Each structure stands twice: as structure tokens, then as C-alpha cells.
Image: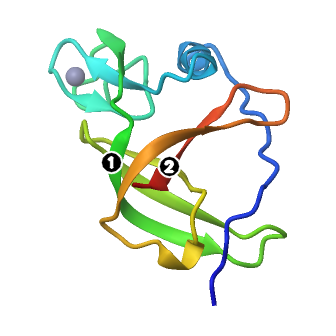
Amino acid sequence: MATPAGDRKIPAPQPNPETKAFWDACEAHRLMIGKCNSCGEVHFYPRVLCPFCFSDKTSLQEAAGTGEIYTYSVMRRAPVPYAIAYVKLAEGPAMMTNIVDCDLDQIRIGQKVKLVWKSTEGGPPVPMFTPI
Ligand SMILES: [Zn+2]
């Protein structure tokens, strides 16, 4: 039996000083990942200190918005079922997100996905993914 993803109310993200630039970019529908200018690694979510070499020479880089499902779980007992997943971005880092706008029973590990934006209750939109 198919489990269509319904419209689910999404609580507003609460930006803090470290994440404000990330959420500001989300307002413009730009998904940003962290890039370290010392070691060259990219990471998600963006951090002030590079998680690889602890340099503070980090900046934001816009992600292409494509990736594949690394792992996922369908929350069937929620009032509106939804799928939570780690998506491995084309740039390398994995991000925790939701898989949306699809039959939740058709989701597969390794599936190619692309970025979509979902509005929240009074906050910036959040980046989610849908199968290509
Ligand atoms: Zn680094």
C-alpha cells in the first residue's frame, strides 16, 4: 500500500549567531555548506570551526542541491507520515533532512534526489529533498 507524503506543518527553525548566515541564504532558496579555506574540506551543517582541522578560516559555499539517499526512516506513526533521511550531497557531506513529495514506500537507499524548499510556520524555509 502506498504511503503518500502529506502536507505536514514544519516548525520554524531557530537561527542562532552561528547559523544565521545559513538561514538567511535559505530565505533566498540557496543551500549553503561549510567550506574550510585551510584544509579545503567541505562540511554540513556550516560551522565556524572546521570539523576536520579546527581552523576558523571557514566560509559558506552554495551546494548544487543534488545528492543521494544514504539512509532513511519513515515515521509512520506521526499524524502525517514523513521520511527522515541522511542525504549525501554531491559535494560530499551528508545532511539530515526529509524526503518529500513522493510515495514514502518507494524511497530507496542510493536513490538520486534533488533539493526542494518547504515553508515553515513563520520561519525561513527548510531544505528538503525529493526523488529525481
Ligand atoms: Zn579544515
Q: In front here: 109 or 56?
A: 109
Q: Residue at x 50, y 49 (%)?
A: 129
Rendered location of residue 106, percent (x, y): 48, 76
Q: Which residue is mark 2?
A: 129
Q: Is residue 32 left or right of residue 74?
A: left
Disc nearer the start of the sequence (2/1): 1
Toward which corner of the image does residue 123 lie, by quadrant? top right
Q: Mark 2 vs ligand 1: CB under 8 Å?
A: no
| Amino acid, disc 1 | Gly
Q: Residue at x 17, y 13 (%)?
A: 38
Q: Is residue 118 left or right of residue 34?
A: right
| Amino acid, disc 2 | Phe
Q: Which residue is mark 1?
A: 67
Label 2, secondary structure: give it: strand
CB contact under 8 Å: marks 2 and 1: yes
Q: Residue at x 72, y 70 (%)?
A: 81
**Colouring of the image:** rainbow
